[in-house]
Image (cartoon, rainbow, N blue to C red):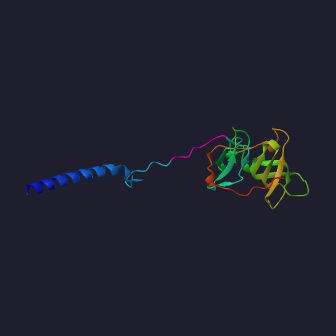
Amino acid sequence: MLSHDRAIVILEALLAFWFFQLAGSTEPALVKRVSDPMAIPDPPQKPVVWTNIHCGDEFGSYRPADPLLRSCTDYGLRKYSCDTSQCHMGTAYDSPKTGPLNQMLYFRGCHKLGAKDQTPYLVYAYSYLARNKKGFLIALGFAVGDMTETVYSFKCPWDNNSARNNMRVWCDKCYQSQDSQIKKTPRPTII
């Protein structure tokens, strides 16, 4: 019996050795927990706020996910979503009080797209899409004198850099846009 007990002890030692070898070899294959429900989450990252953005190529032609924001594309084709309460006309040193959009975002000598007559209009714009190298922009807005304030697309040319139609919106509180957050609306056709 003594040899039988000895065989059992040796077998137990071999099984223990084998078990610890197996446990040690499978440890890297264990699945790491993705999140600990008891852990305190990291605070959400605040989006970077950009100031003094000059909306040189586009303003308001598509709506970001937040209804209080408007689109803005600068001359470098970087897209932003801007707080309209912080946007203004004039220069970078103006403010929404000195250059309010509802009074100062207008263009002169514009022609209604698709109209046969070439009557020039003074247009209060809601948005614009500039073709700077071609010397015109497409403004979405209404003509002064139109009592119904019906919104049309207008082509507004300019012939020099200091012309009224070459002035652009400035915004002082913008967030860089992510294409996945942008809800695009159809743009007017350019004639």
**Can you say whether 9 is above or below 56 in the image?**
below
Residue 23 in sight here: yes
Residue 8 percent coordinates (x, y): 15, 56
Span colored in magenta: 45-52
Is residue 12 within the magenta segment? no
* Displayed quadrant of residue 149: bottom right
Q: Nearer the viewer, residue 179 or 147?
A: 179
**Can you say whether 114 is above or below 137 in the image?**
below
Residue 162 percent coordinates (x, y): 81, 38
Residue 59 percent coordinates (x, y): 72, 49
**Residue at left offset 66%, top offset 46%:** 79
Residue 164 in sight here: no
Residue 165 located left or right of residue 1? right
Going by the picture, which residue comes out furthest to the left? Answer: 1
Q: Nearer the viewer, residue 38 or 30?
A: 30
Going by the picture, which residue comes out furthest to the bottom? Answer: 148
Residue 146 located left or right of residue 80? right
Q: How many callouts does the rendering have? A: 0
Q: Nearer the viewer, residue 90 or 131?
A: 131
Residue 161 percent coordinates (x, y): 81, 38
Is most of the magenta stretch helix, strand or loop?
loop
**Residue at left offset 15%, top offset 53%:** 9
**Residue at left offset 14%, top offset 54%:** 7
Quadrant housing the N terminus: bottom left
* Displayed quadrant of residue 158: top right
**Residue at left offset 10%, top offset 54%:** 3
